[in-house]
Structure formats: structure tokens, C-alpha cells
Amino acid sequence: MGYCFKDLTATCQEDWRRYIEHDFVRALGTGTLDQNAFRCYLQQDYLFLIHFARAYALAAYKSRTLSDLRQAKAGLSTILDTELELHIGFCREWGISETDLAALPEARETLAYTRYVLEAGHRGDLLDLHVALAPCLIGYAEIAAWLNEQPTTVRGAANPFDAWITLYEGPEFQQAMLDEIAWLDARLAEVGPRRFQELSQTFSEATRLEVDFWQMGLDQRG
Amino acid sequence: MGYCFKDLTATCQEDWRRYIEHDFVRALGTGTLDQNAFRCYLQQDYLFLIHFARAYALAAYKSRTLSDLRQAKAGLSTILDTELELHIGFCREWGISETDLAALPEARETLAYTRYVLEAGHRGDLLDLHVALAPCLIGYAEIAAWLNEQPTTVRGAANPFDAWITLYEGPEFQQAMLDEIAWLDARLAEVGPRRFQELSQTFSEATRLEVDFWQMGLDQRG
Amino acid sequence: MGYCFKDLTATCQEDWRRYIEHDFVRALGTGTLDQNAFRCYLQQDYLFLIHFARAYALAAYKSRTLSDLRQAKAGLSTILDTELELHIGFCREWGISETDLAALPEARETLAYTRYVLEAGHRGDLLDLHVALAPCLIGYAEIAAWLNEQPTTVRGAANPFDAWITLYEGPEFQQAMLDEIAWLDARLAEVGPRRFQELSQTFSEATRLEVDFWQMGLDQRG
Amino acid sequence: MGYCFKDLTATCQEDWRRYIEHDFVRALGTGTLDQNAFRCYLQQDYLFLIHFARAYALAAYKSRTLSDLRQAKAGLSTILDTELELHIGFCREWGISETDLAALPEARETLAYTRYVLEAGHRGDLLDLHVALAPCLIGYAEIAAWLNEQPTTVRGAANPFDAWITLYEGPEFQQAMLDEIAWLDARLAEVGPRRFQELSQTFSEATRLEVDFWQMGLDQRG
């Protein structure tokens, strides 16, 4: 008993660091990332977001309280009303039109990650689904914060990827991370070792799938 | 081939009329409905809406296109942001506090109908789920229109239930009905007899569960 | 922490006794049950079993270990290969042909109970599904044992319903109950109060739906 | 209208041939496949089968007729009672113990394919799930038949992989393929172009995931 979110990252510490400090992330921070790598990432992240919207919808379905239902619906709305628009804007700036986005083939890494999360949600309950979603939601906020701590990170107009850091370091996204950690902490506090083992397996698998997603960008396989 | 929404009501014409023209509905129209019957209905309808929000969330999950995903999310938002608030307001006017609502036991009729719809959605695809939801969405709009055609219907301050009719005869709800019929017509046009038979079974069962829901109000079992 | 199966029945003790000692059960034991009530029950129980087979299939899908997968598959096989055949045989003895069974309309009580269990399984995880199934599996074994303890119970040829008691008092069914209790005890031992509250709500609702199912027989609504 | 299974392979003819005639398959036929490649494949196929058992369980849940329910249950039983045992035997012959199998990390290709199929089954109905399963069930039977037609294929003791071909060319597996094609043909005959487009997308994605699975063996990434 007495688990919390930090125990999830602790069980896959090496993979978690590989994800947070991935070469893709470092190159975003220094502004030296290959622009085609970023384009590939942006495009696949658009497809990713659509499936993540479906995952939040599944979380809304799985909710047992009006409060959880409203929270999941807020996540769904944020993706559909805000993040997708931002992505379409980002993509436009990087020379990718909405027509391109609609015709995009899905990379293996996008397919593997999104279907893993959705299926974990179906097999388990709302907590399983939140844990499968956590590496993305919590990880991106942690990545933005980590980048800001690195002396090599370049901010402002000198870094073509500055807008990406700005989005995820922003107060809204950071608050969403804190809320999610609080939600998880409250539930993990009551979980026994058998259940924690199931949850940490899901969390570490999803973390590795995030690593693959960065690598896909670097390899420009998307 | 070549089915449309009207073919669904045609396969259960008798049950459909029993639902649209139920004694509960008639008494709403004439203003003579027992007030405890209405209170019972309002309370259970509040619980019903929460599960229907979950059904729209399931529809969002099941969507294959961004357009279907956005449409389902709009339905979910309407229930959570508008209809639930309206219900809480209605309930307050009828002497039911939010504390009462939170502690409400679920009537058998509410449980049977909501779980039937949700399970039909899981078993089938997005079309099955829409068909299971149709008696509620399309039926309420048809009921409001039907009431307005009845010479016995009393409108305005003389009818304590006038606000209910106003809600469902309103242009937003009527338009939602037309949109839903259009969505169903487009898909049913391509359906073969085996599939139509499955869908019409779901539709007629959901219609009978609506009849039970009215009757629960009259019997004040909620 | 430290919950077990008995804690589930303890949270709905009154409903649990209403289910185990229902007038339908007592009349089965004394052999005085109305034969049409039994016929109604048998027919609806046939439909019930088909949906329970689907629930065991869902449990197989939701399994995280090969052992849970094999156990759920064994439950599915028992229903499809043994219990349904027994029911068809029972029904034949009571003058209900397989053609009758295939054309049977589903009673509201059957629909409510089966869809509730299936939907609880979708919303939650494997433990939620087991808890929703427990009143049926564990309850029937307990009912048969309870009947054998009652001085009023008539066994043998003098009781037209003796075969029913024989089925559920038999070593296979009793062992299945013990296995299920052991499975639940192992998992409930690790569950915290928030989760236990969710599970006990599902258990008590399913218990009340069992009471309704007996009552349906007495009322011959099936 | 008037689609059939052949129309599914026709929409992704190139990928279908890449799957059926993959270098892994050819090397199986000539007996020249690298033994570590085969070992890697066998191990991952063991994990694959466990998730495919879950997919058949999901098909049992999704069934609307007793006949479909029994058919899905038979598929589940075949995997759990026969194929897994055969795999454990195969693995033993190739020096992989059951302890090895239990501790096996899941390759990305296994994860991507299995979760894609399961999620496609949740999103859609029983037909979607069957279509997602078809490349495996129907493809393996076609591969065994195709190998037997190739002049380069070596059969008998001279080919260390002969047992693999024997399994899938056998009458039981070939009959299962014919039954599945008949089931699909009956349903696809009633499907319109919008629905066929959805189904063919699922089919071609699953086919590409089969190609990845062969390639994983060759690359020994499992």
C-alpha cells in the first residue's frame, strides 16, 4: 500500500530517462533538430492526437463519478478544440497543409502506441487507462521543464522549435500535469502490490512506446 | 438495400406509437400529470442523462472520422454543459435539491434502458450505438411536435409542464433530430437485410424501454 | 485493506437474504412452486445463460494471465457445452421445445440483469466483472446448500423440482463456488476502501437484480 | 453491393503478396531459414497466440447468435487447448523452455499487431473483428498451400521447418480457412461501399502488420 505516481517512474527509471532526455528532445532544445524529423513528428503527432481524443472519450465512458466524467470530457475538448487546431497551425508553418494531414499514412510507431493505450483501457478500468495515458500527459510537461533547466537549451527566436517548448511549459499544461499526478496519487495510495505490478507494466510499456515515437521522428519513418 | 430511419419505426409501429402517445405524454400536454409522477420522472431522467453522456462518449471512442468524433463530442458536451444544468434547474423548481439528486437510487427502468444502450454500443459498431440512442433523441423531438398538434395540449403558464415541451420543441433540439435522421439515413441506405434486422431489433427494444420509462413515472416507482 | 468475499454480502445483507431465501426458492424446496412460474423461469434462464456465456467470454478477453484466461474459457465452455444442454433438457421435460426457446421474447428482468453485468464488465476490469457475476455463481450454490438445511425442503421424486436442487448442490457447482470465492478473496485482500465501495455497489445491484429475476418467475412475466 | 473476401485481398494486392511470399516464408519452404530467426518467430508467435485467444473471446462476446458464439468459442478452445500446446512443443524442440516463454519480452511487432486487432474489434462490430483476424487465419492456410506449389519447397526430414508447413496445410486448418471465407462472403455480400472501404482499410493494415511480423523474425528483433 501507499504507492504514488513517482513509484511508477521508479519501476522503469532507465526507460523514463531515455524518454525525457531523448536525442530528439535534446535537439529540440538546442534548436539543431533536423527539420524533416520535426515535420515527420508533427504529422504523426496529429494522427496520435485523434486517437488520444478517442482515449479520453473512453475515459469519459469508464467514469463512475460525474467529476471523473467531466474531467475526461475536458481532456477530450482540449484535444479537439485546442490541440488539434494548434497542430494544424504548427503544420501550416512547417509547410504541411490540412489536405496533407488528412491523407497521411499512419506510422507503425503511432499505430503501436495508440492502440496499446486504447486496448489497455478496454482491458482494465479507468485507473489502467489513466496510467497508460500518463507518460504522454505527464511526460511532455516534465520534458518542457527539463529542457528549461538545461544550459544548452536555446529559447526565443533563435530556436525554430521554441513554440513547442512554450506550449508544454505553459501554465495550463503544467497544471494539467499536476492535476493528473494528484488524481493518480489518490488512487495509487489504495492499491496493493499485485495491482501495482499490473499498472507499472502498462506504464513502462507506454513509456517505451514514447521512446519509439521520438526515434521515429529522428529516423523520419513517419 | 435502401433502408432509412422511417423503416426502423415501421418495424415496431405499435410500440413507437405507444411511446410517442403514452399516457404520461398526454398528461404532460394537458397539464394534468400527477406532480409526483413528474418528480419521479425528472429524478430518474437526471440519472439517465449521466449514462447517456457515457453513451455519447462511447460514440466518440467508436468514431472512425474526425467528423463523427466531433459530432459525438458535441452530444456529450450538450448533455454535460446544458441538459444536466437544465435538469438541476427543473428539479430545483420541483423541490428536488442537488443533494437529493446525488443520493438518488436508480430505478430498474433507468438501469435497464441505460445499460441496454451502452451494451448494444459495445457489442456492435457506431451505427448500432446510434440506433440504440435514436428512440430517445429522435423520439423526444417527435413527442414535442406531436403534442403541439394535439387540440388538447395546453401551452403557457396554464400548463405546469410547459417548460418541458418548450425544451424539446425548440429549434436546437429539433435540428439535432433532423441531423440524426440524416446521419442514420445515409448509413441505412447502404445496409442489407441481415444487418437491418439486427438494427431494427435494437431499435424496437430501446423503444419498449422508453415506454417502460414513461410508465415508471406514472407508477412513481423511480 | 483486508476485504474478502463475505464483506460483499455483509454490505447488502438484507438484499442477499431476500435473494437466497426468496419465496420462489422456498417453493422450489417444498415442491409447491407453481409450474408455470417454473416454466417462465426456465425459459428466461435459457436466455440469461446465453448472455452469461458472453460475460465469461468478456472475462477471457479481460484476463492478464494465462491462468485467468483458461479459467474464464472453462466457464464459457461449461455454459455452452453443459448448462445450455441441461436447460434444453429441463425445458423439454417441462414441455418447452427448442423452437419455443429460439423464439422467446426476453423479459425485462432478464434484459436488465444481463446488460447490467456486461456493462459493469466493460466499465471496470476483470475484478469488477467477477464481482458482477458473483451473486449468480456463488448465490446458486449457497441457495442449494441452504435448501438442504431447511426442514421443509422435500427431496427426491416427491419434489418435481428436485433435479434443479441436485444440479446446484452437486460437487462440481459447489467446487466452482469455492474456487470463485478463493479468487475473489485473493484480490479483495489487496483492495482499498474507495475501490471496495465501487465493488460492493456492483455486487448489491446484481443481488437485487437476482431478486427481481425470482420475482419475475412468481409473477410469470417472463 | 456484392463484395466477397477476394475483394479484400484485391484492395491490397501488393501487400498481400508481400505477406504470402515473404522472404521468411520462402526460406521456411526451402529449409534455409536462419534458425535464430525461426526461434525468434516461435517465441513471439506464442505471445501472439495468447492475444489472439483474447480476440476470439472478444468475438464470442460480440456474437448475436448462438451459432456465432459457439464458433468463436471453438476458435478460442483451439488456440488454448491445441495451438498453444503445439507451440510449447515446437519451442521445446527448438531449445526454448516454458520458463523462457513465460518471461519473454513482447516485441514491438507483436504488440502493434495484436493491439491493432483487438482495438479494431472494440471499435467495430463482429464483422470488423473477423476482418482484422482474417489475414492471420486465412493467410497462414494460403501460405502453406502456396509453399506446396513452389518447386523450391523442400518437404520431409530434409526441411527442419517441415512441421510448420504440415500444421497449416493440414485438413483442419484448411477447413477453418474455408469456413471463415464462407462466413465473410455471406456478410460482405450485403455490405455497401462506405462500409467496405472501412473493412478493407482494417484488412490491409492487418496484412501489413503480418509483413512486419515476418520481418521481425528475419531481423531477430523479437
Image: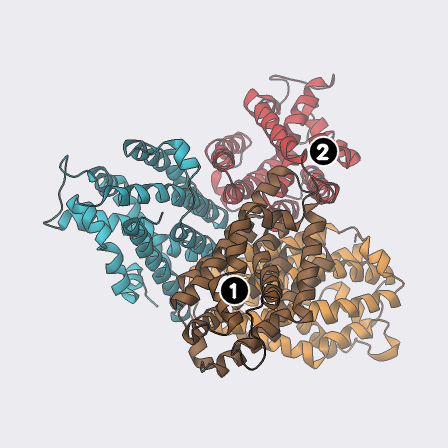
Chain colours: A brown, B orange, C red, D cyan
The residue closer to the viewer here, D172 or B173, is D172
Judging depth in this view, the residue of C118 and B30 nearest the camera is C118
Q: In this view, does B106 lie to the left or right of B57?
A: right
Say which residue appears at 60% left-offset and 52% top-offset: A131
What secondary structure is marked by label 2? loop
| Chain letter behind tag 2 | C
Horizontal and vertical percent position of residue A194: 60, 38
Type of amino acid at the residue the image marks with label 2? Tyr
> What amino acid is labelled 1 in the image?
His
In the image, taking residue B141 as reference, residue B59 lies left or right, namely left
Mark 2 and mark 1, same subunit? no
Q: Which of C84 and A31 is in front in this view?
A: A31
Crowd band around label 1 with a 10 angstrom C-alpha radius: few (<14), some (14–19), many (20+): many
**Quadrant in the rendering for residue B169:** bottom right
How busy is the neighbourhood of tag 2: few (under 14 within 10 Å), some, or many (20 plus)? some
Q: Is residue D159 visible in the rendered structure shown here? A: yes
Q: Which residue lies furthest to the front in this view?
A: A151
Task: Assign the C terminus of chain C to one quadrant of the image.
Answer: top right
Q: Do the residues labelled 2 and 1 touch (CB within 8 Å)?
A: no
| Residue C3 image label | 2
| In-image side of C148 versus D18 (left or right) | right
Identify the residue shown where x is 67% and y is 58%. A180
Q: Residue at x 88, y 77 (%)?
A: B158
Q: Mark 1 points at which residue?
A: A51
Chain identity of mark 1: A
